[in-house]
Image: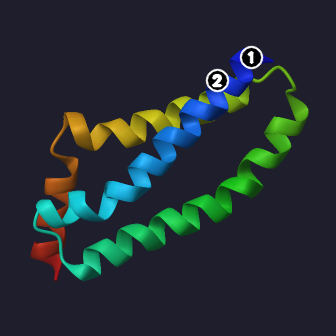
Amino acid sequence: MLPSLAGYFFFGWGYVVYLAFIVQWVRNAGGTPLLISTKWSILGVGVILSAFLWRGLLAKHKNGIPLAVATMATAFAAVLPLITDTTKIAVEDMKRIG
């Protein structure tokens, strides 16, 4: 049970840190308020839909592997802007579009 608790702790910690600083990351990359609200909207829709997508899989596989995969995917997505210029690229794309 301790590994599960540790996993939830680190997931929650990373989630809070990521969400606390996402707006500043986008601003620092030159993002507009429209881009910031778009990112939050996409994130919100993703969170809502994820409950429906993962519910059956998590219920079917009680071994924790789907939860581990979901957590690793979230970790990768949270770290990606730190190791690449994806935020800056997204800002530049939004500037060209709008």
Q: Mark 2 points at which residue?
A: 6
Distance of label 1 from label 2 (alpha carbons): 6 Å
Q: Which image quadrant: the C terminus?
A: bottom left
Q: Residue at horizontal 61%, vertical 36%? A: 70
Q: Is residue 25 left or right of residue 47?
A: left
Quarter location, residue 77: top left
Find out whether the residues at labels 1 and 2 contact each other: C-beta distance under 8 Å. yes
Q: Which amino acid does label 2 sit on?
A: Ala
Q: Is mark 2 on a helix, strand or loop?
A: helix
Count of labels in the image: 2
Identify the amino acid type marked 1.
Leu
Provide residue 96's location: percent of width, then percent of height.
Answer: 10, 74
Depicted 45 relative to depicted 12: above or below: below
Give above or below for 94 relative to 88.
below
> Label 2: few (<14), some or many (≥20) within 10 Å?
few
In this rendering, would 15 be left or right of 89? right
Give the SS element for disc 1.
helix
Q: Is residue 4 left or right of residue 98?
A: right
Horizontal and vertical percent for residue 46? 56, 60
Residue 37: name its quadrant. Answer: bottom left
Residue identifier under label 1: 2
Quadrant position of residue 79: top left
Task: Give me the residue at 27% from left, 82% from top.
Answer: 34
Residue in the image at 66% along x and 64% along y: 48
